[in-house]
Image: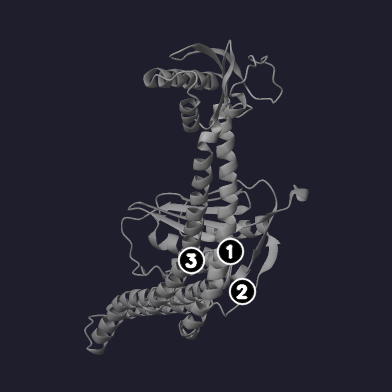
Amino acid sequence: MASIRNFLDSRKALYSKLGLTIVLYLFISFAIAAVLGVITYLITESAVISITRNENYFNQEINDTIADLQNYITVNQISATNQDAISAWNDAYWYVMIRIYNQDGIIYDSLFYQPSVYEDSQSTAPEVIFSDGLDYKYGYDITFTDTKGKVIITALFQMRYELVIKYGCYIFTFVVCILIFMTLLKKKIHYINLIEKGIKIIESGGLKYRIPLQDDDELTSLAISINDMSRAMQERLEWEEKAKKENYDMITAISHDIRTPLTSVICYLDLLADGKYDSPEMLHTYLENAKNKAYQIKGLADNLFEHSLVTNEEIPFKYEAVNGNELMAQFISDCIYVLEDKGFVVEYEDKTTLPYTLSVDVQQLGRVFDNLCSNIMKYADQTQPVSFSTKIIGQELMLTQSNQIATETTSQDSSGIGIQTCKKIVTRHNGALTVTKTQKYFSILITLPVQQNILQA
């Protein structure tokens, strides 16, 4: 927790660095916003030009403009000599360039010349030949109050949107700059607050909490360090809690299992001490029963001692590479011999097809098979077969032992410490032991890593 408190003490230093961060974020925000603004301007302008130069759109707009001009002339009773009125209309349509003429000559021209040039001019309408690359529409009829004429017209319709696009992009750039700056700054401050919140949660005992990682800066490195420290503390506390629970469960189970045979021993000894037996045969029976119960207590004590040795990681196993086929055959053959001697029928199916190697502590693995045999003799139904099978799937040896459970058992050793010991042994061999138990059926699956020797196949 010292490193966390040191970080809390250094919060002022972190916040003092925010000044430089603000300047940097302003520069980044402006650069990004400017680039986005230019791109937006170019895309928008290109789209507007593409739309306004579309032939159908252009023709429709030209026709609407001519119609509006004719309507303006008609409504306002404008004569061909009233160039000021015509110019006023053209000012409203500043993006439109027109030339109006009749049989007497040019009446009005904003296409190439100023109207004043043609005052008192006797020139006739020029030929409709131009080389400036603009799109012209010719021969539109127009009617004034005093005469009829023709209109040559062209227009740059996209210019209507030029100012809107330009100032719209200015506003867009400004807004984006502000938004990026506020987002970056808010994110920085939010992350500092998030780290502080995480520290408080961890200090209050929430070791499972992890501070989210963002970006890749000094704050992220600090968050990673805090998360690593929290994870290490959590794993240590969980391991200690698990060890305490296992020890408590084991002691509780052993105490319960020892109580019954110990009570029996005390009862038999009290009977013997009080002389409550009628014959030498009864005396012998009491002594024999007391001896059996004492051995039962000794077995429980031995199991407890063996379990403590196996679960102690500081006591090393002596691993060696052995021929897996031979070792499994030996262990299972020994079990079959012992069980058949006790009247059990044993079935064994070996499905391994290739030679394989096991890296094991032979003595410790032998304890697993001794425990299997012991459990079978204590709990298995002797009238039903006991089965063993071995097979290899992938890089794992799978050993299965199954039997039916006897309806009545005389053994009182039900603490399960033997199975727990076997699990620890198999786990320390990088394997796994799984128990499946129902009211009538019991099965154990043991998996161990193997190396198959294909060259010997």
Q: Secondary structure at mark 2?
A: loop
Label 1, label 2: how many angstroms apart (C-alpha)?
63 Å
x, y percent for residue 180:
50, 58
Q: Residue furthest right?
A: 455
Task: List the residue tagged with mark 3.
Answer: 185
Q: Nearer the viewer, mark 1 or mark 2?
A: 1
> In the displayed image of the protein, which residue is found farthest to the bottom?
273
Is residue 88 rendered to the left or right of residue 40? Answer: left
Residue 305 rendering spot, x and y as whole percentages: 47, 80
Q: Residue 109: x and y, percent?
A: 58, 24
Q: Earlier in the sequence, mark 2 or mark 3?
A: 3
- Which residue position is annotated with label 2? 317
Label 2, residues with CA under 10 Å away: few <14, some 14-19, many ≥20 = some
Q: Is residue 61 left or right of residue 32?
A: left
The residue under label 1 is 27
Q: Nearer the viewer, mark 3 or mark 1?
A: 1
Of the image marks 1 and 2, the number of the one nearer the N terminus: 1
Query: Would you identify the image quadrant in which residue 198 lies?
Result: bottom left
Q: Quadrant of residue 356?
A: bottom right
Disc 2 residue type (three-letter): Phe
